[in-house]
């Protein structure tokens, strides 16, 4: 993948926004606004000028000063465009009384862009020092030159394989032997081995003599750690932006990968790569950082994917330092500043702030940071008022507003002023979403945390959110039917939705989310339709969670079907007969299956078929008594979880013969299941298999 410079990242984001203003015919907020229509010729001219310099920006050699200048010019152009759009929206909305946004002139920005273009065309770039050049190091820690010594090749191959192998735990490898045998030479050979250099992006060499001073040794280690900063400087730009961003999260924070990826996309760090969805590209970025040992896996999903990550304290401090130097973001805590005006200089044009709710209030009152694009809160606070409309005036350029750790009782109507929001996360107790929120046509992610479960009917103008990718509301939500025949109401970009209310086949509704990849839904019986939801319409669906909230399920007598693309399936309360399991077994890509709260009903399950790709199976709170299974039924199973199945008489002995099985989790309160699990482990150990682990759970709320 081609490296993307800091300037090019901003440029691509601006050009994509301009393209929507020029070409988009489906957004009523743009097409019905005469002020936007009148400005389209100038917007087109701006797009053409930016397009003419894009080639220079992409191909130019790295020049830090020029790159920063281009970035600043591009961001200024984005400010001009966005403030114009906000002003146009306010003037076109006669019911609003706030009108302090003025339509800025495009002329000065166009002149500045032309000036940069002229400099790019005439400039002869000065080559920078080679990317691999290292600063001079203390001679006591210098890496010895690799000498040619016969007889080390075999040892070197063995050690390279061990260093680069897929070890489950950290390992220490010692090279021992008499003096003069070539131990140091072998170590240097390994250190400089091309494959090791490729595999380990951060390496350090420290020499410890027989007599050493702890202070000197610590200084040597810190000197070696300086190579971390060097490695950060030479990260590809698309990874560097993502990595610096992680430094803004709290110390020792386990960062949910889903949240991080959605934020990266909203910030514009993720760029299209062929036909891949942006979320998959972002996941590739994340795994690249993990493979480089820059991020630590904190928690994995049942199928082995990374669920949460964290950053080492030392690397986090480095990110904070770099972010401050480059004005990439500002980090503030309750004790870290006196007032927002002293913390942020107006001239800094600070774009991102990681702070707390007190700081948010101060900016609202003193207007000290009008250029902020992202504001993220991490402090836990039970009550915080967003009810004053005026509090959003200083944030007209916001793209990211993440306040999901602070509780607010209402969602103010003035949110519609934040026309450029791409990511909005709130924690509230509202049961109705204001229709004004649906005017945020740039919004990609909407997260609404709730204190209790309930129902929410989304506004009639929901279809205005044409760029929405992720809708995550902790209530059962219903999408209104389309009443306007001129509006198809299809959410083409929607990837994730939770928790959607479905009735009967729900065919017309499911057709409106054709590209959904993750769906959580509550299915209710429809007296008019004796049918199961038409999930087979969703060709891209990979994750499905389906609950049946009613006490008596009426789904048990209906023919069930799922799309072949499904990888993760969670069922709860459906009371299907075990005979229907054959339908699920035929899913060719299924890796995770969770059956919860009487998802299936009946005393006996005979697993006659085969789950071809299943890696994780969980049975919880079922009335099953007898389970028959064979090792060939689960050829890829790695983990089995059995909880609250109080009537189950035991685990089939053949389960122990599954060659891939690593862990069985069981509930302590079912003695028969615990005994059968221990017997399976004993039988396997008798055959030399010590890899299978048994986990007896006493408190299993975290397993739900």
Image (tube, helix red, strand yellow):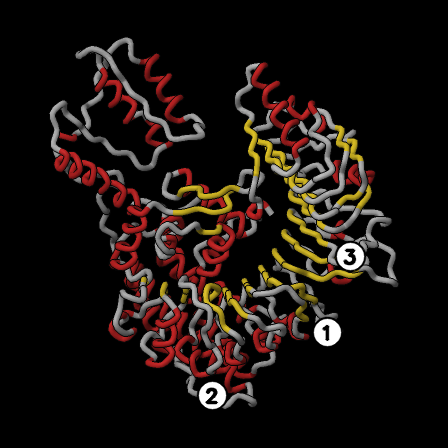
Q: In this view, does 477 lie above or below 322?
A: below
Which residue corresponds to the image point at 68% horizontal and 71% vertical from the top-left? 457
Q: Is residue 159 above or below residue 449?
A: above
State the image coordinates of residue 630 (x, y, percent, origin top left): 72, 25
Q: Is residue 66 visible?
A: no
Q: Which of 14 and 329 is in front in this view?
A: 329
Q: In this view, does 348 lie above or below 698?
A: below
- Is there CB contact under 8 Å for labels 3 and 1? no
Instruction: Count residues near mark 2 (Cα–Cα under 10 Å), then give few for <14, some for 14-19, many for 20+.
Output: some
Of badges 2 and 3, the one in the foreground is 3
The residue that label 2 is drawn on is: 98
- Is there CB contact under 8 Å for labels 2 and 3? no
State the image coordinates of residue 405 (x, y, percent, origin top left): 46, 63
Which residue corresponds to the image point at 76% horizontal and 38% vertical from the top-left? 624
Which residue corresponds to the image point at 63% horizontal and 74% vertical from the top-left? 432
Which residue corresponds to the image point at 32% horizontal and 50% vertical from the top-left? 316
Q: Distance between the residues labelled 2 and 1?
A: 31 Å
Q: Which of 229 and 211 is in front in this view?
A: 211
The residue that label 3 is drawn on is: 551
Q: Distance between the residues labelled 3 and 1?
A: 40 Å
Picture mark count: 3
N-terminal of the pair, mark 3 or mark 1, is 1
């Amino acid at each position: 993948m081609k490296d993307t410079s800091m300037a090019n990242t901003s440029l691509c984001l601006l050009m994509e926004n301009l393209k929507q203003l020029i070409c988009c015919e489906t957004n009523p907020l743009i097409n019905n606004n005469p002020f936007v229509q009148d400005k389209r010729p100038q917007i087109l001219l701006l797009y053409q000028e930016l397009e003419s310099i894009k080639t220079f920006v992409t191909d130019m050699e790295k020049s830090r000063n020029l790159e920063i200048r281009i970035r600043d010019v591009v961001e200024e152009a984005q400010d001009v465009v966005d403030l114009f759009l906000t002003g146009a929206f306010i003037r076109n909305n006669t019911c609003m009384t706030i009108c302090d946004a003025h339509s800025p002139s495009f002329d000065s920005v166009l002149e500045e862009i032309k000036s940069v273009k002229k400099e790019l065309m005439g400039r002869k770039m000065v080559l920078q020092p080679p990317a691999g050049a290292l600063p001079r190091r203390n001679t006591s820690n210098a890496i010895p030159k690799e000498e040619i010594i016969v007889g080390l090749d075999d040892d070197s191959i063995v050690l390279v394989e061990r260093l680069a192998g897929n070890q489950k735990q950290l390992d220490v490898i010692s090279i021992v032997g008499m003096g003069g045998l070539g131990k140091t030479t072998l170590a240097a050979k390994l250190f400089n081995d091309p494959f090791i250099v490729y595999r380990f992006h951060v390496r350090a060499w420290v020499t410890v003599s027989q007599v050493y001073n702890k202070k000197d040794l610590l200084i040597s280690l810190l000197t070696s750690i300086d190579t971390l900063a060097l490695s950060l400087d030479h990260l590809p730009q698309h990874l560097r932006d993502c990595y610096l961003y992680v430094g803004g999260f709290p110390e020792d924070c386990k960062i949910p990968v889903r949240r991080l990826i959605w934020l990266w996309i909203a910030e514009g760090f993720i760029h299209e790569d062929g036909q891949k969805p942006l979320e998959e590209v972002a996941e590739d970025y994340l795994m690249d950082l993990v493979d480089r040992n820059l991020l630590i896996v904190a928690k994995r999903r049942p199928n082995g994917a990374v669920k949460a990550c964290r950053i080492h304290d030392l690397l986090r401090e480095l990110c904070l330092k770099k972010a401050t130097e480059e004005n990439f973001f500002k980090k503030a805590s309750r004790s870290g500043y006196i007032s927002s005006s002293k913390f942020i200089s107006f001239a800094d044009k600070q774009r991102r702030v990681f702070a707390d709710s007190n700081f948010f209030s101060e900016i609202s009152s003193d207007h000290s940071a009008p250029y902020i694009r992202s504001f993220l809160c991490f402090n836990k606070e039970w009550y915080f008022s967003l009810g004053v409309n005026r509090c959003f005036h200083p944030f007209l350029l916001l793209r990211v507003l993440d306040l999901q750790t602070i509780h607010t009782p209402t969602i103010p109507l003035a949110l519609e002023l934040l026309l450029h929001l791409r990511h909005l996360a709130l924690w509230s107790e509202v049961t109705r979403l204001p229709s004004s929120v649906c005017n945020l046509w740039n919004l990609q992610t909407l997260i609404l945390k709730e204190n209790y479960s309930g129902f929410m009917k989304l506004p009639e103008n929901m279809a205005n959110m044409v760029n929405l990718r992720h809708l995550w509301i902790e209530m059962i939500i219903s999408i209104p039917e389309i009443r306007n025949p001129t509006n198809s109401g299809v959410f083409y970009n929607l990837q994730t939705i939770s928790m959607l209310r479905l009735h009967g086949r729900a065919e017309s509704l499911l057709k409106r989310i054709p590209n959904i990849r993750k769906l959580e839904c509550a299915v209710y019986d429809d007296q008019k339709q004796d049918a199961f939801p038409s999930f087979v319409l969703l060709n891209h669906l990979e994750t499905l969670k389906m609950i049946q909230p009613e006490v008596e399920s009426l789904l048990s007598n209906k023919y069930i079907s799922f799309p072949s693309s499904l990888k993760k399936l969670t069922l709860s309360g459906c009371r299907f007969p075990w005979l229907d399991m054959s339908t699920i077994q035929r899913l060719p890509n299924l890796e995770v299956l969770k059956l919860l709260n009487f998802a299936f009903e009946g005393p006996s399950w005979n697993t006659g078929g085969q789950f071809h790709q299943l890696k994780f199976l969980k049975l919880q709170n079922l009335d099953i008594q007898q389970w028959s299974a064979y090792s060939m039924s689960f050829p890829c199973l790695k983990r089995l979880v059995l909880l609250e199945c109080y009537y189950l008489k035991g685990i089939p002995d053949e389960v122990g013969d599954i060659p891939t099985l690593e862990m069985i989790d069981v509930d302590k309160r079912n003695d028969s299941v615990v005994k059968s699990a221990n017997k399976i482990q004993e039988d396997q150990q008798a055959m030399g298999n010590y890899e299978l682990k048994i986990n007896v759970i006493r408190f299993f709320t975290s397993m739900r």
